Amino acid sequence: MEELHKALKDRDLTVSTVHGKGRSLVTARDFYPGDVIINQEPYVCVSTHKRCDGCFRTTNLSKCSRCHVVWYCGTSCQKSEWRLHRLECEALSRLDDRKRKSVTPSIRLMLKLYLRRKLQDEKIIPSTAMDNYKLVEALVAHMSDITEEQLVLYAQMANLVHLILQWPEINIKEIAEIFSKFACNAHTICDSELRPLGTGLYPVVSIINHSCLPNSVLVFEGRIASVRALQQLPKGTEVLISYIETAGSTVTRQKALKEQYLFTCVCPLCSKVF
């Protein structure tokens, strides 16, 4: 993680460990309202519904003629995604129609993650301090906190991924654990009107902890996740965003956070005694 610390230092940020929270992103200089704290491209992302897999547009779409699963708005997006989709396409094309219909966005996200790791390992896709599989490995999975029912579901999904990829060395338990990481760490990519466009995994942005009284906000510019300051953040301030809608009652917020992210919030708003 030394490379990550250096990359963040160049962006006037640092990673610290906060008791009860684990890793946290901390400012190394003053930030002011509206300042961009950090931008990150997704390690992997998938579109939801019928959208271009490259830019998430919904116009002039054509299905991939081989796998019949992925949509593109034109040759530009198709070419930009080809190194990764070539492998995904080969895997999806082996499925019969029934199994192909069971390939959900979550399954595709996992396929793309494994395939992107493979391409980075083989130096076909470059790795950087902000874009490498080690950052995914460092994400929390909360495996000890999930229900037996959820474990069974992850195992079933992992078996489908194994069936699609057909890699002898693939580890079912590891896949199930990564599905749990997706649940805790993946972000819904939204447009400016907060309409969902897709799902992405942003391992550095995922270091940022939650507060129901956030000092920063996560927005999306296309597929890029951008964290901006909502208020002045003096040097040494932990960057905090809200993972959920904060307008609800404390009980509602706590329930949503526990069910989705498997933790109990102790931010000032949740700890306030009325």
Image (tube, helix red, strand yellow):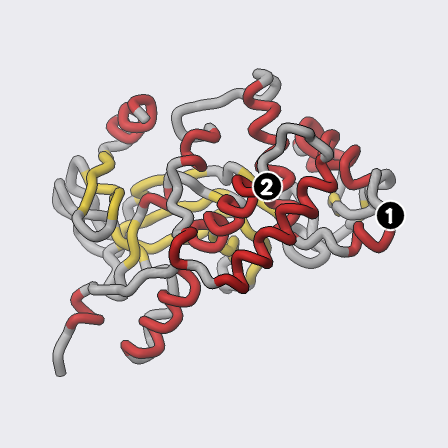
Local packing at callout 2 (Cα closer than 10 Å; few below 14, some 14-19, many 20+) is some
At horizontal 44% and vertical 23% (from top left) the residue drawn is: 128
Location of the C terminus by quadrant is bottom left
Residues 232 and 91: in front is 91
Q: Which residue in the protein does label 2 denote?
A: 172
Residues 168 and 102: in front is 168
At horizontal 56% and vertical 60% (from top left) the residue drawn is: 196
Residue 76 at least partly seen:
no
At horizontal 46% and vertical 28% (from top left) the residue drawn is: 132
* Identity, as a three-letter code, of the amino acid under mark 1: Asp
In the image, 227: left or right of 148? left
In the image, 117: left or right of 187? right
Q: Which residue is outermost to the front?
A: 148
Q: Position of residue 30 (x, y in %)?
A: 16, 41
Q: Position of residue 148 (x, y in %)?
A: 50, 62
Could you say whether the residue bearing mark 2 is in a helix, strand or loop? Answer: helix
Q: Quadrant of residue 7?
A: top left
Residue 266 at least partly seen:
yes
At horizontal 21% and vertical 64% (from top left) the residue drawn is: 266
Q: Position of residue 97 (x, y in %)?
A: 86, 52
In the image, 260: left or right of 52? left
User: Which is more N-terminal, label 2 or label 1?
Assistant: 1
Location of the N terminus by quadrant is top left
In the image, 1: left or right of 48? left
Q: Position of residue 106 (x, y in %)?
A: 61, 51
Q: Which residue in the protein does label 1 denote?
A: 96
Spatial distance from mark 1 to mark 2, Cα to Cα? 22 Å
Local packing at callout 1 (Cα closer than 10 Å; few below 14, some 14-19, many 20+) is few
* Identity, as a three-letter code, of the amino acid under mark 2: Ile
Q: Are marks 1 and 2 in contact (CB under 8 Å)?
A: no
Q: Which residue is outermost to the top?
A: 123
Residues 32 and 236: in front is 236
